[in-house]
Image (cartoon, rainbow, N blue to C red):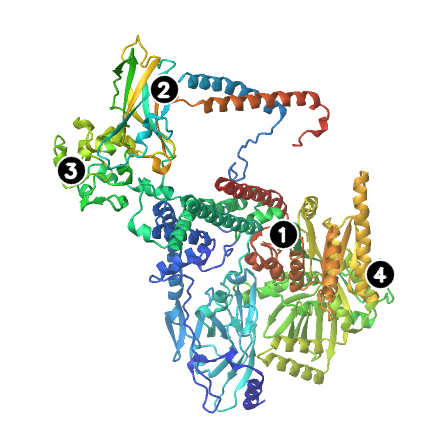
């Protein structure tokens, strides 16, 4: 692939304005290549402060007078200054200036602190490479294109492309705790062509340009390309992804030092872009308060108008207008009647302005702010295990907690512990349970399995080994290393006491479970994965490609080459995404086992493999390479490539992992339901598992009649019929229910639970050509309203938000609450009236985006039923008292 | 007042929650105090028959005697009122009805009246005006308090508020303003008619103003107070006044700005119908009432025109009690409220007695 071809191709399909080109080390590319328009980049100064010394007064005043209360006060004050008023301007001016001054001082002090912090950050020393030498400079002097050296435990000063590391394999470990709260170490990879440059001189000799997209706030997405020039040869182009990008704010761990080139600096770093505040939510009480205020404003204006009119009626008698004892001045007599009437009107406005309770805004805000401390002070909501209590990110929504009608909860990590335990695996219909193993012996548990091939023959044994290897190899787990890696290697081998770290607890559970079955994953070294088999031999597999996990595909794959030279693709994923791609294997037995496990509330994963010939692998390689090099739509192209690669698989088996319920989850759900709050579970998990969890946490009870609105049912009947049938069942029941209530005590009330999956939901939500979607939506909502519990499974994150929005905008306008712990819940947390994050194991993204964060799901009970109730009662009394006071 | 939660964490340059859980040092567990855990004792009354019925009876029993006491006191106050505007053609003052400010000869009239009951204690003599808007905004503001307080510079440069009554013929007016300009200037004299002889009754013109007004708020310009004419040099009299302010009275301590009639007038009334204290009639000895029952005559020097704005002028004689002047309303209000409470108490008691125990399950839960 020649460069000219490359560029023309790119230029043809991409818009260059959205890209930036960086000369690594400020070295111009060899002449003859395309000339880029030089772009100006900001320096590496982080500015979190709002004001400067000069603009503080005007900007602060402007910000403060944007608040409606302050502005109203100001207008009244100005009117009092201008016209001949009955009350002195001091009476409204003094409190206004007091409030303004106090707020300005407070904000000024906060901004001064921010300036101090900014300065400290901008002046901290950074190591640069300049002409082959290491130079120390202040962080703020960093420019795009500078080559930076970062030592262990230092924070990256800007967004860097990882060039090389002191580790031989070109990796480094990074913790992004301060960015997204995930404290696990993540592995980043240096650019292949530069990872050999270990000292300053080498790095300085590097001649390369980087093309990448303009900065975007998404922490996990990055596409770019590096062109490395070797002498006079054509440049080598390499793809850059988020695994090459070290983000500002992250900290280097377990790596002595790395070199990187700055690509985004200062306010363009992803961290700075993420500082932008999210949209403001407003509480229902505040909205109704505003309506009241508008009504009162109308009353005020009409009052002033009526009074002005009455004044002129009364004055029409000249003895009243100007009796001998009370004469007007000449100028007063000459004044225009309309002008006079207008100033009289303004005077009446000023006279009656107390009817608008302006102080209410300040008081209500203070009440909410101080009141929110009761939540954080609550002893019962403090979690001893994590040492954390509830967090209040916004106190504006306190009283909404007491008005919640719908609770949308995530399952994994919210209802359940997200503490995975490997329960069993099923290979070719044989069930293995690691708990039963005592001395490395595998016992077969054959109960309940229809075994066709009971004696594991030659092929069976082979499959079994493949299965275990697949589980050992197909993951993204890292082994936590101690400081002296080489010294402890032996000890680790003998003691098998590795600590596994991964962003997904399922994977850790699987690798640990497999370890108990005899196969230990040791480490990834120089692109070779090492596993220890039960015979204590180390097997080495070369990691060729990693087709990483995403929530759309719901599977991941690795392509490895064994020592023997065989190339395997191992694929692991949800049953729904694996079964359609399988052509061989004991599908029926495994499927039945998977379904059985799912009913028991276990999380199941299926494992499949595929063997590549050399030729097949080459084509696969090319396919991936093409997709990875794309600058635009890389995601889409990669997904297409994955789709092509992961097919015609051979099914090996399935695993089952248990996720325990959180403590008191059932108790909490029961209490919420008793309080009349409808609880919906929205999960990405499969239906059977999710339903089992719902039974376990008493969302569904024994007598709950389950209504299913799933893809399977829709395949049998049309969506229209299914919806019609369901609504008939539900409505007939609700009709009889009212009669029952009149007739007296109806003992066993039939309640309904609805199960809907993502595919069915998207069918319902999809707008039709004939415009009948509204009808479906209405019918669906009607069914939902009559169900005591709803379970939505197989939901993509955006679908969760869609459901919340559907309910939020339904005609009753109920107050909704979404609770979740993971990044996939953020969209629904932002969508719902009140978003609650659980400060759980899946990182802090949910907690950061939420309005309130609590340590455990069980705390929701007290939060809604006690604190929310109190807040609602208090705020309503306060607001009503205010209107009573002025009215 | 923008309450900013993020201030601290932004200042740190890190988002919240970076702090390692279970880190070194003290636990972040909240204190177990009654306030923080919202366990402070609270009391909320639950209204039951047991609390409401006694409350009604007690209120009734307290209010009715108070009301009766106040009502009796108010009724014991003697009050006599004469309207001397002269709008009726048979009225002796009818001839003076259209008196104007610049008439040179004073118009006098005499009204005879009879007191049926003696006035035992000190009697207060008031003049009353109706339909006179002393509360008009333009009127109320039309004065210069620093001038009235004896400030020499304000004396010669009256405040703008006094317009259009601040200067006359190029000279500053002292006292300036509409209030002072429209000062009440009828002269009232009271005679007891005993066997066709008119015995003048001593009318005390001192002690009718507030002490603070007389001694603090109103002061003559500083200088030799014995020669007020010199002190008010360079000023002119208000347009409607017949004579300048330093000739209001012959006594020095009741002349100029500290003339008590003037001070009383300057304290503006809140309603268009008002009365102001004019004179005091003190009881001379304990054997005789201050004003015996019998015939009296009131001599009026009619200077003050009220007919142009449909006003009325009255003369009121009244005694006072510990609760002030005659005011039957307060007593009636007390008696009414007390009676209603008592009545409601009885009604509720009957209802409670008759129906109260019928359904015990209807108790308020909790």
* Residue underneath mark 3: B232
x and y percentages locating residue B180 in the rendered image: 26, 37
Reading the image, the residue beneath label 4 is: A449
The answer to whether any part of residue A542 appears in the image is no
Q: Is residue B279 left or right of residue A314?
A: left
Give the crowd class for mark 3: few <14, some 14-19, many >=20 residues within 10 Å: many
Q: Is residue B67 above or below residue A831?
A: above
- Helix, strand or loop at label 3? It is loop
Does label 2 or label 3 sit earlier along the sequence? Answer: 3
Chain letter, disc 1 residue? A
Q: Residues within 10 Å of mark 2 (few under 14, many from 20)?
A: some
Residue position for label 1: A815
SS for callout 1: loop
Q: CA distance from mark 1 to mark 4?
A: 48 Å
Tell me, yes or no, if residue A645 can be seen here. yes
Q: Chain of mark 4?
A: A
> Are dots 1 and 4 on a single chain?
yes
Q: Give the foreground label among 2 and 4.
A: 2
């Amino acid at each position: 692939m020649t460069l000219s071809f490359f560029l023309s191709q790119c230029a043809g399909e991409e818009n260059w304005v959205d890209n930036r080109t960086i000369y690594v080390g400020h070295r111009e590319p060899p002449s003859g290549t395309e000339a880029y328009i030089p772009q100006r980049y900001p320096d590496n100064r982080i500015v979190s402060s709002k004001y400067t010394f000069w603009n503080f007064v005007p900007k602060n005043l402007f910000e403060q007078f944007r608040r409606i209360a302050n502005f109203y006060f100001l207008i009244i004050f100005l009117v009092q200054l201008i016209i001949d008023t009955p009350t002195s301007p001091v009476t409204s001016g003094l409190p206004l200036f007091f409030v303004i001054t106090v707020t300005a001082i407070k904000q000024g002090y906060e901004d001064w602190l921010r300036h101090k912090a900014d300065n400290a950050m901008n002046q901290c020393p950074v190591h640069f490479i300049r002409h082959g030498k290491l130079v120390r400079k202040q962080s703020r002097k960093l420019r795009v294109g500078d080559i930076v050296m970062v030592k262990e435990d230092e924070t990256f000063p800007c967004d860097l492309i990882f060039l090389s590391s002191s580790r031989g394999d070109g990796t480094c470990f990074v913790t992004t705790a301060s960015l997204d709260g995930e404290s696990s170490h993540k592995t980043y990879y240096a650019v292949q062509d530069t990872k050999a440059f270990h000292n300053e001189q080498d790095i300085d000799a590097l001649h390369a340009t980087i093309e990448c997209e303009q900065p975007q706030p998404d922490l996990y997405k990055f596409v770019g390309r590096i062109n490395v020039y070797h002498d006079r040869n054509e440049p080598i182009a390499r793809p850059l992804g988020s695994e090459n990008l070290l983000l500002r704010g992250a900290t280097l761990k377990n790596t002595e030092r790395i070199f990187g080139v700055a690509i985004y600096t200062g306010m363009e770093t992803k961290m700075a872009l993420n500082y932008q505040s999210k949209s403001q939510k407003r509480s229902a009480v505040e909205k109704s308060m505003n309506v009241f205020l508008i009504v009162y404003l109308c009353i005020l204006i009409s009052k002033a108008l009526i009074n002005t009119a009455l004044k002129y009626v009364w004055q029409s008698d000249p003895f009243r207008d100007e009796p001998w004892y009370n004469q007007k001045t000449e100028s007063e007599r000459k004044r225009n009647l309309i002008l006079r009437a207008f100033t009289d009107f303004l005077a009446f406005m000023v006279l009656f302005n107390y009817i608008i309770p302006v102080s209410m805004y300040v008081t209500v805000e203070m009440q909410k702010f101080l009141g929110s401390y009761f939540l954080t002070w609550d002893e019962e909501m403090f979690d001893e295990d994590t040492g954390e209590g509830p967090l209040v990110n916004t106190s504006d929504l306190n009283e909404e907690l007491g008005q919640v009608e719908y609770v949308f909860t995530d399952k994994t990590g919210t209802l359940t512990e997200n503490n995975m335990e490997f329960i069993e695996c099923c290979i070719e219909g044989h069930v293995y349970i690691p708990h039963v193993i005592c001395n490395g012996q595998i016992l077969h548990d054959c109960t309940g399995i229809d075994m066709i091939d009971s004696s594991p023959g030659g092929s069976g044994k082979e499959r079994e080994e493949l299965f275990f290897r697949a589980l050992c190899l197909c993951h993204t787990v890292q082994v936590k290393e101690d400081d002296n890696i080489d010294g402890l290697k032996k000890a680790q081998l003998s003691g098998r006491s590795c600590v596994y770290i991964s962003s997904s607890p399922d994977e850790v559970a699987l690798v640990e479970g497999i370890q108990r079955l005899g196969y230990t994953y040791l480490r990834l070294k120089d692109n070779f994965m090492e596993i220890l088999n039960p015979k204590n031999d180390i097997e080495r597999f070369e990691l060729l490609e990693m087709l990483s996990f995403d929530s759309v595909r719901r599977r991941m794959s690795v392509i490895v080459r064994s020592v023997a030279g065989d190339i395997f693709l191992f694929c692991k994923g949800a049953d729904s995404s694996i079964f359609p791609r399988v052509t061989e294997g004991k599908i029926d037995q495994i499927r039945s086992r998977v379904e059985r496990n799912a009913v028991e509330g276990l999380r199941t994963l299926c494992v499949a493999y595929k063997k590549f010939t050399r030729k097949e692998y080459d084509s696969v390689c090319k396919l991936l390479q093409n997709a990875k090099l794309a600058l635009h739509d890389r995601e889409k192209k990669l997904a297409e490539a994955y789709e092509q690669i992961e097919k015609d698989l051979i099914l090996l088996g399935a695993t089952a992992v248990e996720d325990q319920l959180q403590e008191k989850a059932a108790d909490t759900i029961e209490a919420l339901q008793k309080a009349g709050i409808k609880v919906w579970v929205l999960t990405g998990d499969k239906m059977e598992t999710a339903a089992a969890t719902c039974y376990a946490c008493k969302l569904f009870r024994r007598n709950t009649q389950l209504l299913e609105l799933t893809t399977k049912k829709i395949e049998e009947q049309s969506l229209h019929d299914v919806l019609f049938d369901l609504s008939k069942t539900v409505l007939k029941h609700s009709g009889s229910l009212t009669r029952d209530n009149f007739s007296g005590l109806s003992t066993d009330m039939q309640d309904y639970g609805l199960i809907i999956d993502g595919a069915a939901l998207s069918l319902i939500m999809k707008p039709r050509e004939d415009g009948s979607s509204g009808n479906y939506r209405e019918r669906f909502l009607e069914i939902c309203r009559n169900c005591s519990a709803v379970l939505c499974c197989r939901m993509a994150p955006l679908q969760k938000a869609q459901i919340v929005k559907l309910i939020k905008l339904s005609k009753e306008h109920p107050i909704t609450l979404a609770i979740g712990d993971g990044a996939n819940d953020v969209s629904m947390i932002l969508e719902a009236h009140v978003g609650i994050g659980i400060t759980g194991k899946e990182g802090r993204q949910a907690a950061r985006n939420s309005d309130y964060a609590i340590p455990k799901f069980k705390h929701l009970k007290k939060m809604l039923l006690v604190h929310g109730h109190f807040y609602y009662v208090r705020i309503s009394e306060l607001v009503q008292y205010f209107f009573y006071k002025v009215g | 007042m923008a309450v900013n939660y993020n201030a601290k964490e932004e200042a740190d340059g890190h988002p919240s929650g970076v702090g390692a859980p279970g880190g070194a040092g003290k636990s972040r567990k909240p204190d177990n105090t009654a306030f923080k855990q919202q366990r402070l004792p609270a009391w909320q009354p639950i209204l039951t028959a047991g609390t409401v019925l006694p409350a009604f009876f007690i209120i009734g029993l307290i209010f009715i005697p108070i009301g009766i006491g106040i009502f009796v006191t108010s009724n014991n106050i003697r009050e006599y009122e004469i309207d001397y505007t002269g709008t009726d053609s048979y009225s002796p003052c009818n001839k003076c009805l259209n008196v104007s400010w610049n008439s040179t000869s004073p118009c006098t009239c005499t009204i005879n009246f009879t007191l049926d009951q003696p006035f035992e204690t000190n009697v207060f003599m008031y003049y009353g005006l109706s339909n006179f808007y002393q509360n008009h905004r333009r009127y109320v503001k039309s004065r210069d308090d620093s001038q009235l307080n004896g400030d020499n510079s304000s004396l010669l440069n009256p405040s703008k508020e006094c317009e259009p009554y601040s200067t006359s013929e190029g000279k500053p007016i002292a006292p300036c303003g509409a209030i002072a300009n429209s000062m009440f200037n009828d002269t009232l004299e009271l005679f007891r008619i005993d066997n066709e002889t008119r015995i003048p009754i001593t009318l005390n013109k001192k002690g009718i103003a507030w002490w603070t007004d007389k001694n603090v708020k109103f002061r003559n310009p500083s200088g030799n107070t014995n020669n007020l004419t010199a002190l008010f040099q360079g000023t002119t009299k208000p347009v409607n006044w017949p004579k300048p302010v330093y000739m209001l009275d012959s006594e020095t301590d009741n002349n100029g700005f500290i003339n008590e009639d003037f001070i009383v007038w300057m304290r503006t009334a809140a309603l268009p119908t008002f009365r102001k204290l004019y004179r005091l009639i003190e009881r001379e000895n304990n054997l005789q009432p201050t004003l015996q029952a019998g015939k009296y005559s009131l001599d009026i020097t009619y200077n003050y025109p009220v007919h142009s704005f449909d006003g009325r002028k009255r003369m009121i004689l009244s005694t006072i009690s510990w609760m002030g002047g005659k005011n039957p309303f307060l007593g009636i209000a007390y008696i009414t409220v007390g009676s209603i409470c008592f009545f409601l108490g009885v009604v509720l008691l009957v209802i409670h007695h008759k129906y109260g125990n019928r359904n015990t399950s209807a108790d308020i839960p909790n």
